[in-house]
């Protein structure tokens, strides 16, 4: 049964159209990655699903209900400014529980439990400023999971982490995802991250923002990206992504220059969009 | 980060916490020692300069002259109704700046918060504050004296007008500078209405507001002294002017040093309050595990 249904959704900011006619269905319990160049509206789509913004046109439903505001069963996690600097780790995790009317004591007790469960028991009295980037995101995840969300929306959650920490956090997310059985929608600009984690990858185009390709990745975890089939999918998506990035960054003549410089994937861009002929005409 | 920080993980959080506390304690004593040394150096240079004649002791009497003078005469100048004593002047000025600062900051916080919360109020209110804020505190003195006479009321008014508009604008800026992710995270975690303001937006804006409060104090301190020198004929500012008119340079120096020390003391007090209220700031500086 499909959990998130996005039909004909547009989102305008003044004159600028951030999302154009998005149709997408996200299965219950799946992990979907939204990949695309900066400014392609993938974050906007995430916030629309989370009820933090409203679509200009179209409709989004979660389990058949229209999204009109933040839902109890949906939690968003961002790249930065997730945790509140002025609360201890324990009180950060207790924050959502307090909003749901739990007493301070009960909320803190459950926060302690959750933090113990994820191996952060020793850090409950720290403030976020005393934690490493990886730990902060683990606390953010704990804060979301303590509310037992059915839908977890993550906006570049590991974007500010170094390579090694990022790999560890990806494995950690997979492990926690299996336990929680939540539906996860993850925004990333890192194709490898999407390949490692997602059941399904939605590739966005930047101009205007809309999904241009949806790829299922049926491989089991842990995945080896060098594996024949995965590598094939990855190479194709990478070429496509580079095209999209080039299109959102460069204009005709520059695209032609890129193709001249031997950038193989740019040749198709130039051909499709007529960059060379337009540029010289 | 290197091996050192990696090793710290294994020492456990308890050891780290006490380490951090000890380090904070040490830095506290170090800053106190710095203040003392600075004052001793300044006093010594002044004394030595006056003794060997580089500084004219008649114009710049050193501490060894104005401190005994202050004790002997209790710092009185003027005759009859114009007589001003040092202690009374000090108390007057402190009360004036305290009341004006309190009202100015308080109203600035309230107005700034309302302007941030109500969009149509912001459209009208911010330009008004932007017109009032650049008016130098001293420019309010004529109006203050006409409205309140030359007493405490005028001084408090000058201080109030000198800081309230800029404090309102600083509050609007601090609230506007709260990262959107904080608010989105909070809303996604079920926070809304006054709870969102009280538990997320205000604490997130607090560091910016605290800095504005400290800067406001300097403006308030200068406003009250300028007011007392330019028409409000009492208080420390007036004492310094009277000392100059009667060529009591020892009194002038005593007044200046008092103004400096009091201003410094208030600022330190505000800093202490900030460290208490925004307790998390001083703990945020160190990262435990290898991160970047």
Image (spheres, coloured by chain):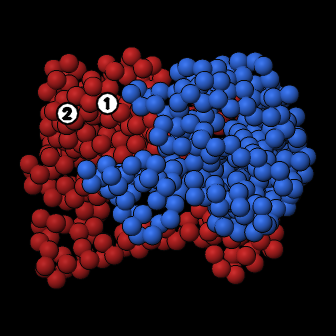
Nearer to me, A21 or A81: A21
Q: Which residue, given by chain and number where applicable, does mark 2 sit on?
A: B135
**Does residue A193 appear to the left or right of B119 in the view shown?**
right
Name the residue located 57 percent from the left edge and 48 percent from the top edge: A36
Q: Position of residue B90 (x, y in %)?
A: 32, 44
Mark 2 to mark 1 CA distance (whole Å): 10 Å
Colour chain B is painted in = red
Q: Nearer the viewer, residue A145 or A223?
A: A223
Answer yes or no: do the residues labelled 2 and 1 have beta carbons within 8 Å? Answer: yes
Q: Indicate which disc, 2 or 1, sits on the residue closer to the N terminus.
A: 2
Q: Quadrant of the N terminus of chain A?
A: top right
The image quarter containing residue A228 is bottom right
Q: Could you tell me which residue is drawn at 78 percent across and 19 percent down? A: A64
Q: Which of the two residues, A180 or B30, is positioned nearer the viewer here? A: A180
Write down the residue under mark 1. Answer: B165
Between B84 and A45, the residue placed more toward the observer is A45
Q: What secondary structure is marked by label 2?
A: loop
Residue B102 against residue A93 in the figure, above or below: above
Q: Are marks 2 and 1 on the same chain?
A: yes
The residue shown at (14%, 37%) is B230
**Which chain has been coloured blue in this picture?**
A
Q: Position of residue A253 (x, y in %)?
A: 32, 56
Q: Residue at x 44, y 53 (%)?
A: A271
Label 1 resides on the chain identified as B
Q: In this rendering, does residue A172 appear at all?
A: yes
Estimate how packed mark 1 is, as few (under 14), some (14 to 19) or many (20 or more) residues with alpha carbons within 10 Å.
Answer: many
């Amino acid at each position: 049964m499909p959990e998130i249904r996005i039909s004909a959704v547009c989102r305008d900011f003044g004159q600028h159209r951030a999302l154009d006619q998005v149709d997408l269905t996200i299965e219950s319990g799946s992990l979907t990655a939204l990949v695309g160049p900066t400014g392609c509206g993938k974050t906007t789509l995430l916030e629309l699903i989370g009820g933090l913004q409203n679509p200009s046109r179209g409709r989004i439903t979660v389990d058949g209900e229209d999204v009109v505001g933040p839902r109890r069963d949906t939690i968003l996690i961002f790249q930065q400014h997730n945790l509140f600097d002025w609360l201890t780790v324990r009180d950060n995790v207790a924050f959502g529980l307090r909003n749901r009317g739990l007493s301070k004591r009960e909320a803190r007790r459950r926060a302690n439990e959750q933090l113990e469960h994820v191996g952060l028991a020793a850090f409950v009295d720290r403030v976020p400023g005393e934690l490493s980037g990886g730990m902060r995101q683990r606390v953010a995840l704990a804060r979301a999971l303590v509310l037992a969300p059915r839908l977890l929306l993550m906006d570049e959650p590991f974007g500010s982490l170094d390579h090694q920490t990022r790999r560890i956090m990806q494995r950690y997310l997979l492990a926690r995802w299996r336990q929680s059985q939540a539906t996860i929608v993850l925004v990333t600009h890192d194709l490898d991250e999407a390949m490692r984690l997602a059941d399904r990858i939605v590739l966005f185009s930047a101009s205007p923002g809309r999904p241009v390709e949806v790829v299922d990745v049926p491989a089991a975890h842990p995945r080896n990206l060098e594996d024949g089939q995965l590598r094939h999918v990855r190479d194709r998506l990478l070429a496509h992504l580079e095209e999209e990035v080039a299109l959102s960054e460069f204009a005709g003549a520059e695209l032609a220059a890129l193709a001249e410089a031997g950038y193989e994937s740019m040749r198709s861009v130039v051909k499709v969009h007529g960059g060379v002929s337009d540029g010289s005409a | 980060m290197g091996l050192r920080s990696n090793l710290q993980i294994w020492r456990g959080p308890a050891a780290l916490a006490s380490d951090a506390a000890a380090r904070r304690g040490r830095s506290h004593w170090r800053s106190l020692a710095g203040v003392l040394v600075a004052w001793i150096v300044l006093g010594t240079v002044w004394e030595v300069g006056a003794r060997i004649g580089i500084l004219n002791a008649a114009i710049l009497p050193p501490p060894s002259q104005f401190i005994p003078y202050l004790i002997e005469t209790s710092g009185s100048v003027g005759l009859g109704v114009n007589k001003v004593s040092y202690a009374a002047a000090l108390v007057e000025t402190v009360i004036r700046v305290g009341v004006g600062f309190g009202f100015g900051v308080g109203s600035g916080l309230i107005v700034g918060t309302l302007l941030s919360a109500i969009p149509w109020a912001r459209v009208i209110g911010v330009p008004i504050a932007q017109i009032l804020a650049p008016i130098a505190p001293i420019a309010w003195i004529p109006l203050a004296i006409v409205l309140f006479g030359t007493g405490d009321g005028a001084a408090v008014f000058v201080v109030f007008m000198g800081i309230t508009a800029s404090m309102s604008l600083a509050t609007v800026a601090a609230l506007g500078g709260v990262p959107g992710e904080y608010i989105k995270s909070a809303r996604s975690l079920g926070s809304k209405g006054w709870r969102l303001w009280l538990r997320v937006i205000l604490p997130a804006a607090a560091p910016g507001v605290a800095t504005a409060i400290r800067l406001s104090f300097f403006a308030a301190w200068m406003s009250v002294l300028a007011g007392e020198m330019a028409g409000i004929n009492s208080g420390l500012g007036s004492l310094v002017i009277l000392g100059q008119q009667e060529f009591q340079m020892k009194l002038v120096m005593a007044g200046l040093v008092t103004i400096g020390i009091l201003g410094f003391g208030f600022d330190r007090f505000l800093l202490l309050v900030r460290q208490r209220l925004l307790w998390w700031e001083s703990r945020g500086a160190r990262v435990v595990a290898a991160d970047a």
